[in-house]
Image (tube, helix red, strand yellow):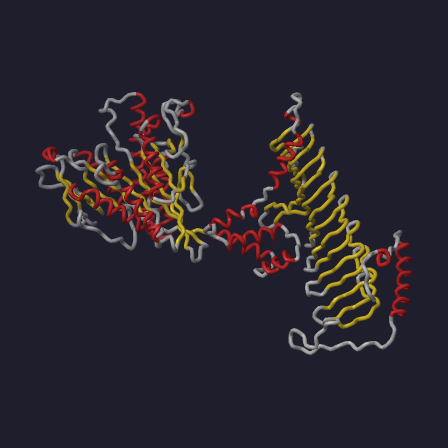
């Protein structure tokens, strides 16, 4: 409802309630003015179209009017800058240029040798604004560029040109139409989009300009010139994130559409393929106008239901099926039906009365479409990271679990998969935005030892015999090992057996690692599948990682137990054996000797409270001489243990015990006994050993007094 000249500008309206329409007059040579067939006059909120020397004319509603003397600058400063403001407010916007052939659509969009087009100037201003706010907001811009007619499309940013006569470009039984079938889908936010388009990240206007010019040249020259008469779409997908919070992002799009004008193909004398191409343009536009008409009728009957913006938004979605006449009209419904702040610009040539009136009539249809522009706010990449971190922390006991992990790592306890993931997420969050840190520490986030194992296995398995069949030797993709397809193998083979590096899945088991002659041998990881009953999602959890021999755990490895215990150390024929460390689920840990899967011989128990026990063990329990240190009390207990219980001994103060504790309390000292207690303890110890010998013999075992055979000494 505002007329614009080169000196007039309109501030951005607080709301965008309907599709805005603009009329832009094509530049006419001074010598051709006498041939003008129509005169346009803007009077308040109406635009009147007069035939020459006629006292009355046709009246039209409009939002913007750009006469010839307004120039390209006024057009760009008005429509283009308002589009930038809308994007910066978080809304999607588009500019659709329509009109008959020869009405100046290309000049409006692309400019000429003297003036820039609305695409270049608007995108330049957009990047200028994004850069200015880059101190407070991160931004990402993706560029898409494609062309369409009725139902086919071509990706102008794709790496390959589709030859016009290529047999893969058949269309309705012919091979004369380039491009591919346009598939339209709806994303998670309810937006329609063309599938299989290449999106390229652009960091600046300079990047955009290079891509745009290269694609435009390819699009209008050479093998792709046959699609130069299609409708063109240039789209920028903009994602911004507030650095202060960073957990949500605003998504929006800025789109420019260059529609091709409908022509009287019969009068043009076209035949064959050229006639088919021109007809497709005419049909696509006709179906678009029909979709607008039917959509308006549908909305008008239900407008009383749209009491809020959300109601209107849903009503617009329900009216979109009326644009299903062809793929072009379907994707245009996303732009002009009211979900985005749309500017439909009608370019007119005053030398043609019929063409100008037809364009003005079509604009009236679009202007009746009401808009419900709602910003799309989604979780950012950082937000997903924080959400996953909080979820994982909650499942493991809360935020304080990180402190527990740091303590566990200080003691050298191997982490579970969940703990490793939690620590990885925490480090990534702490260094968010630090590209140098992530690049330098990428080995932390992605293990690369598998590549080394594959290479070494490949060298070991390499054969020079030309008779060796690839079917039984080499690298194999996934293959099924049973009829139900529940068992698979993927990896290296030799002589028809698993050999080298591979992954074997069966039942609820997954082994990923090295094989020798069909058995697990070398380094590998064994995992068991778990089913989450709530989400019904199946995941694998590590139960062992380390060395294997002849199909059994053998060598150095780490075992994660179902009860939460973690063991790292030596294994022999599948059982814990040799020196190792057992990290108990309650936070205690045992370091020492293991045999047949249990603690056996000398070992030290460290408790969460800080106290520790050093002494002898048998069958996984404290059995024999030992010494218990009480850190807080600064005392120690010398004595004998049986089945984890202290059965005899003496308790003494530490030699360096202080009278006042760390908390300021007064400590009590144990007075000396004043008697010789060692003979008494020795007699009791001998009786205890006799009982142990009989008990072990009754179980078919032999009692071994490690205190006699070991080099470790407990002073009693």
**In this picture, is 80 found above or below 400?**
above
- 478 sits left or right of 186 in the view: right
Quarter of image, res 609:
bottom right
Please say whether residue 301 is visible from this viewpoint: no
- Measured as percent of width and height from the top left, residue 552 is found at 74, 41
Please say whether residue 103 is visible from this viewpoint: yes
**In this picture, is 272 found above or below 67?**
above
Q: Residue at x 29, y 24 (%)?
A: 275
* Most foreground residue, 648 or 91: 648
* Most foreground residue, 418 or 268: 418
**In this picture, is 539 found above or below 692?**
above
- 199 sits left or right of 711 in the view: left
- Measured as percent of width and height from the top left, residue 147 is found at 35, 33
* Most foreground residue, 651 or 712: 712
Q: Residue at x 16, y 35 (%)?
A: 353
- Measured as percent of width and height from the top left, residue 172 is found at 39, 25
- Measured as percent of width and height from the top left, residue 196 is found at 43, 36
- 523 sits left or right of 337 in the view: right
How many callouts does the rendering have?
0
Q: Quadrant of the C terminus?
A: bottom right
- 544 sits left or right of 16 in the view: right
């Amino acid at each position: 409802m505002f007329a614009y000249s080169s000196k007039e500008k309109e501030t951005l309206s607080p709301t965008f309630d309907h599709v805005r329409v603009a009329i832009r007059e094509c530049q006419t040579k001074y010598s051709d003015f006498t041939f003008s067939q129509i005169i346009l006059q803007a009077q308040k909120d109406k635009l009147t179209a007069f035939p020459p020397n006629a006292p009355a004319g046709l009246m039209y509603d409009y939002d913007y009017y750009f006469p010839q003397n307004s120039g390209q600058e006024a057009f760009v400063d008005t429509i283009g800058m308002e589009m930038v403001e809308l994007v910066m407010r978080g809304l999607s916007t588009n500019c659709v240029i329509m009109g008959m052939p020869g009405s100046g659509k290309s000049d409006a969009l692309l400019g000429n040798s003297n003036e820039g087009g609305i695409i270049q100037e608007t995108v330049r201003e957009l990047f200028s604004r994004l850069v200015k706010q880059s101190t407070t907001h991160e931004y990402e811009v993706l560029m898409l560029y494609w062309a369409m007619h009725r139902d086919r499309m071509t990706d102008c940013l794709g790496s390959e040109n589709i030859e016009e006569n290529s047999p893969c470009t058949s269309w309705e039984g012919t091979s004369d139409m380039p491009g591919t079938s346009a598939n339209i889908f709806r994303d998670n936010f309810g937006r329609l989009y063309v599938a299989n388009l290449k999106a390229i990240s652009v960091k600046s206007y300079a990047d955009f300009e290079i891509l745009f010019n290269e694609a435009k040249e390819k699009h209008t020259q050479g093998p792709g010139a046959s699609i130069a008469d299609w409708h063109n779409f240039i789209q920028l997908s903009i994602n911004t994130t507030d650095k202060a919070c960073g957990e949500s992002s605003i998504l929006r799009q800025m789109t420019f559409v260059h529609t091709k004008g409908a022509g009287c193909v019969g009068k043009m004398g076209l035949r064959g393929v050229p006639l088919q191409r021109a007809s497709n343009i005419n049909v696509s536009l006709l179906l678009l106008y029909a979709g607008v008409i039917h959509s308006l009728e549908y909305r008008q009957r239900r407008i009383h239901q749209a009491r809020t913006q959300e109601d209107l938004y849903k009503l617009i979605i329900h009216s979109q099926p009326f644009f299903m006449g062809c793929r072009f009209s379907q994707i245009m419904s996303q732009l002009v039906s009211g979900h985005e702040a749309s500017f439909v610009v009608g370019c007119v040539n005053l030398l043609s009365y019929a063409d100008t009136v037809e364009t003005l009539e079509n604009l009236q249809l679009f202007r009746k479409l009401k808009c419900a522009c709602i910003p799309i706010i989604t979780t950012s990449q950082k937000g997903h990271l924080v959400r996953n971190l909080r979820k994982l922390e909650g499942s493991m006991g809360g935020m304080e679990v990180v402190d527990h992990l740091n303590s566990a790592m200080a003691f050298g306890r191997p982490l579970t998969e969940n703990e490793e993931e939690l620590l990885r997420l925490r480090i990534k969050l702490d260094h968010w935005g630090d590209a140098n840190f992530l690049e330098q520490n990428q080995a932390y986030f992605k293990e690369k030892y598998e590549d080394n194992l594959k290479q070494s296995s490949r060298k070991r398995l390499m054969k020079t015999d030309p008779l060796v069949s690839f079917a039984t030797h080499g690298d194999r993709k996934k293959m099924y090992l049973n009829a139900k397809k529940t068992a698979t193998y993927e990896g290296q083979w030799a002589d028809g057996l698993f050999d080298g590096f591979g992954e074997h899945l069966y039942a609820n088991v997954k082994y990923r690692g090295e094989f020798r002659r069909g058995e697990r041998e070398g380094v590998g990881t064994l995992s068991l599948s778990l089913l989450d009953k709530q989400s019904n999602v199946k995941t694998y959890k590590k139960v062992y990682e380390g060395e294997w021999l002849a199909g059994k755990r053998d060598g150095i490895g780490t075992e994660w137990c179902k009860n939460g215990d973690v063991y790292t150390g030596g294994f022999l024929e599948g059982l814990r054996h040799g020196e190792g460390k057992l990290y108990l689920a309650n936070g205690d840990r045992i370091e020492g000797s293991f045999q047949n899967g249990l603690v056996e011989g000398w070992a030290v128990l460290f408790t969460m409270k800080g106290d520790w026990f050093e002494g002898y063990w048998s069958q996984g329990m404290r059995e024999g001489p030992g010494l218990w240190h009480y850190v807080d009390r600064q005392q120690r207990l010398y004595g004998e243990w049986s089945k984890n219980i202290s059965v005899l001994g003496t308790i003494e103060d530490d030699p360096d015990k202080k009278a006042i504790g760390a908390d300021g309390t007064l400590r009590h000292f144990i007075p000396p006994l004043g008697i010789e207690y060692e003979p008494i303890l020795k007699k009791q110890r001998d009786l205890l050993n006799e009982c142990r010998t009989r008990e072990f013999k009754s179980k078919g075992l032999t009692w071994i007094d490690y205190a006699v055979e070991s080099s470790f000494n407990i002073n009693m």
